[in-house]
Amino acid sequence: MKPEVKAVLDEVNKQADAVIQCWAKFVALTQDKKEWEATRGQVEKVLTELYSFRHNGSTEGLKELIERSRNSNAAPGSSSASQ
């Protein structure tokens, strides 16, 4: 793989991981909020697809990530967000 392609792919993966963290936090914080049901459903669908892409086709660990996000006071995208 050419170095410039690898560099772009690394950046894409970094940004995808940040989106996963942010959306997991959104899903966690809106689970019991009826007014967010439609949006949460759409976000959950894409979150699951993106998570699977980043984890070699597996969604194992996604529910745990969402639960940790519910219990975390860290803002989405903070430096403690590496998975």
Image (cartoon, rainbow, N blue to C red):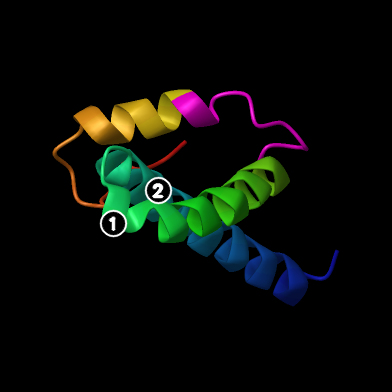
Q: Residue placed at 82% from the left, 70% from the top?
A: 2
Q: Are marks 2 and 1 in contact (CB under 8 Å)?
A: no
Name the foreground residue: 12 vs 57: 57
Above or below, comparing residue 50 to residue 69 in the picture: below
Secondary structure at badge 2 equals helix
Q: Which residue is mark 1?
A: 35
Name the foreground residue: 46 vs 60: 46
Q: How far is disc 2 from disc 1 in space, using C-alphas?
A: 22 Å
Above or below, comparing residue 25 to residue 19 in the picture: above
User: For this view, does 82 lie left or right of residue 58?
Assistant: left
- The question of residue 57 being in magenta is answered with yes
Q: Which amino acid, mark 2?
A: Gln
User: For this view, does 55 lie left or right of residue 83?
Assistant: right
Name the foreground residue: 5 vs 36: 36
The dot on residue 21 is 2
Q: Which amino acid, mark 1?
A: Glu
Q: Residue placed at 65% from the left, 69% from the top?
A: 7
- The question of residue 80 being in magenta is answered with no
Instruction: Give how far across and how far down residue 21 sits, in percent.
Output: 40, 48
Predominant SS of the magenta segment: loop
Q: Earlier in the sequence, mark 2 or mark 1?
A: 2
Boundaries of the magenta span: 55-63
| Crowd rating for badge 2 (residues with CA inside 10 Å; few <14, some 14–19, many 20+) | many
Figure quadrant of the N terminus: bottom right
- From the image, state whether disc 2 or disc 1 is nearer to you: 1
Instruction: Give how far across and how far down residue 49 sits, in percent.
Output: 67, 49
Secondary structure at badge 1 equals helix
